[in-house]
Image (tube, helix red, strand yellow):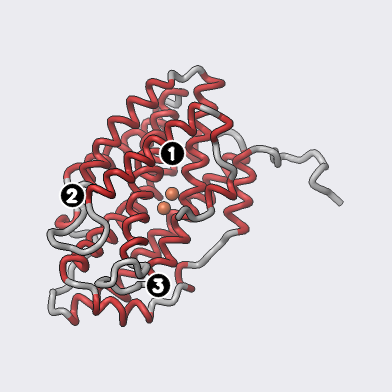
Amino acid sequence: MSTDTTPGRIDHDRRSFRYFRNAVERHWDPHEIGLAPDREAIREVPEPAFDGLRETLALFGAGEEAVTEDLSPLGVVLEDVADQLFVTTQLYEEAKHADFFDRYWRSVIAPEEERRGLGPTSPTDDRWFSDPYDELFERNETAMHRLLREDTPENRALAYCHYHMAIEGILAQTGYYGVQRNFSGEYAELPQLPGLVEGFSRIRSDEGRHVGFGMWKLETLVREEDVDPTLIEDTVGELAMFVQGIVGESTEEGAIGVDDETLVGYAAEKHHDRMTQIVDDSELPDVEELVALEE
Ligand SMILES: [Fe+2]
Ligand SMILES: [Fe+2]
């Protein structure tokens, strides 16, 4: 009988293996989240905030769909088996996130649009997407697909900068923060949406692990492959400008809830944290900390 100390194919001490196991142990199903209370409560969301929520959900849904496809090149180029196992869980989780956003739109947003006489909108409608959003995701696609043609340490670093740092580590984290604060009961004028908040909490926990993997990879590329840390700083710095453009315009005129300045400040703080964590190995948080929910 084999035990954990028997030599095997997979390095059990590798960070990516621990992350992979953490993903398996924390498995959840987006269809098990109850949405009936949200269908009732969403009636109380005032018009500008309802518009803002639709936009946020459309952006997240599109983002999750895009990242599932754009992550695949990484699974193709990584050589280590534990790394491949981890990327497999990440792909699966991005697919679940896309499923959650689609389900929320179909069962909560669409019926409420009809009740309000707004006419059905599609989460894929151009109206929800701004130029900085399109630009950021196009650049991400280019950075990820470049790995298939030219797999170099620098190009790997660029891929992690786009996907794991800018999109997951800064943009998405800021989006979760805004939605969770708005619909957790903090604002008297906004109802609680428990299904939405639960889904976002689960997704955010998964994303903590994804971001941790990207930061670990960047830190390793700098330490072992001589990737210049200024390449990382410059790239993430440039992409952070697009993030600021997206979140700085995300709140609808007159909407109650977290305002644009707070979101921009939060994004800047996340940017700073990520950069500190990758230049110093000892700063990389443990996986339990990554998946725990920040206040
Ligand atoms: Fe995701
Ligand atoms: Fe992710």
Image-based side of 119 in relation to 200, left or right:
left
Looking at the image, do the residues carrying marks 3 and 1 touch, with CB atoms under 8 Å apart?
no
Please provide percent x and percent y for residue 266.
33, 45
Q: Secondary structure at mark 1?
A: helix
Labels 3 and 1: the sequence-earlier one: 1
Image position, residue 238 (x, y; %): 28, 30
> Which of 294 and 89 lies nearest the eye of the viewer?
294
Cα separation between marks 3 and 1: 36 Å
Q: Residue 167 appears in which quarter of the rendering?
A: top left
Q: Position of residue 40 (x, y in %)?
A: 31, 82
Disc 1 vs disc 2: Cβ atoms closer than 8 Å? no
List the residue tagged with mark 1: 73
Marks 3, 1: nearer the viewer: 3
Relative horizontal placement of residue 16, taking residue 186 as reference (left or right): right
Q: Which residue is mark 3?
A: 194
Q: Are marks 3 and 2 in contact (CB under 8 Å)?
A: no
* Residue that appears at 16% across and 66% down: 48
Q: Amino acid at mark 3?
A: Pro
**Front position in the image: 26 or 98:** 26
* Residue 249's disc number: 2
Residue kind at label 2, given as amino acid type: Glu
Label 2 packing within 10 angstroms: few (<14), some (14-19), many (20+):
some
**10 Å neighbourhood of mark 3: few (<14), some, or many (≥20)?**
many
**Residue at x 35% of width, y 72% of height:** 193
Of helix, strand and loop, which one carries label 2?
Answer: loop
The amino acid at mark 1 is Pro
Q: Residue at x 46, y 31 (%)?
A: 276
Q: CA distance from mark 1 to mark 2?
A: 32 Å
Crowding at dot 1, Cα within 10 Å, few <14 / some 14-19 / many 20+, comes out as some
Mark positioned earlier in the residue sequence (3 or 2): 3
Answer whether residue 111 is visible to the viewer in this image.
Answer: no
Q: How far apart, in angstroms, are the residues tagged by discs 3 and 2?
A: 26 Å
